[in-house]
Amino acid sequence: MTHGTSRQTPVRPEHGIATGLGRRSIVLVGMMGSGKSSVGRRLAARLALPFVDADTEIEKAAGMSISDIFSIRGEADFRAGEARVLARLLEGGPQVLSTGGGAFMSPATRAAISAKGISIWLDADFDVLMKRIRRRQDRPLLKTEDPAATLRALMLERNPIYALANLTVQSRDVPHDKIVDEIMLALACEMGAAPAPSAGECAP
């Protein structure tokens, strides 16, 4: 009995995902601290795609930090610039694109992402987010007297909108590569690309 190479080598989903994407971007959405940048970089490396952080591109375009944009120009000006930058970035797919926490709230931005990308919500619970956010001091929306209450209010407002994303993957305190594995499986199932045997099975 002859065994060909295809029988010996597990089918990997990367090629099928890349083919299914075409010129579209994989767009990560979710709350600050959900891991969009760190997971996004690993996902991009796995798929051999560019990684783009929208917040970094906004800072380049404005010539100042996001904290300074908020304090000097205000949130409304920041959101308008964010929408313009995201619309431009979405023309540059395929790529893995990490967005700011409030970006997906804009109906126009959601429509642009739907037209030119596949959105993935990295859904993290309050305790995970709070633990991660405490490590950083660059979150303008949490510079309040009660950051925990502010975070809860933002989650209550935003989570129903994040749930409109094409896919949802739970972000939690496990190695980031495990989250990437789960995103790869979700993408492979979404696109009909065969998951690797070790990745798990598509939900019925």
Image: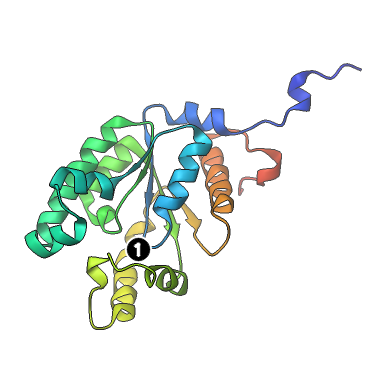
Task: Give residue 185's position: percent from left, percent from top.
Answer: 58, 44
Q: Which residue is mark 1?
A: 160
Which three-letter amino acid code belongs to the residue tagged 1?
A: Pro
- Judged left or right of residue 171, residue 94 is left
Viewer can see residue 108: no
Q: Considering only vertical position in the picture, is 152 above or below 140?
A: below
Viewer-nearest residue: 30 or 133: 133
Task: Give residue 21's position: percent from left, percent from top.
Answer: 43, 31
**Coloration of the structure image:** rainbow
Task: Give residue 90's position: percent from left, percent from top.
Answer: 28, 36
Toward the bottom, the furthest residue is 145
- Residue at 16%, 43% in the rendered image: 61
Viewer can see residue 48: yes
Viewer-nearest residue: 94 or 115: 94
- Residue at 61%, 49% in the rendered image: 203
- Residue at 27%, 47% in the rendered image: 56
Q: Considering only vertical position in the picture, is 71 above or below 149?
A: above
Task: Give residue 144's position: percent from left, percent from top.
Answer: 22, 78
- Placement of the N terminus among the 4 image quadrants: top right
Tell me the element at label 1: helix
User: How crowded is the residue under tag 1: few (<14 C-alpha within 10 Å), some, or many (20+)?
Assistant: few
- Judged left or right of residue 192, residue 196 is right
- Judged left or right of residue 5, residue 109 is left
Q: How many marks?
A: 1
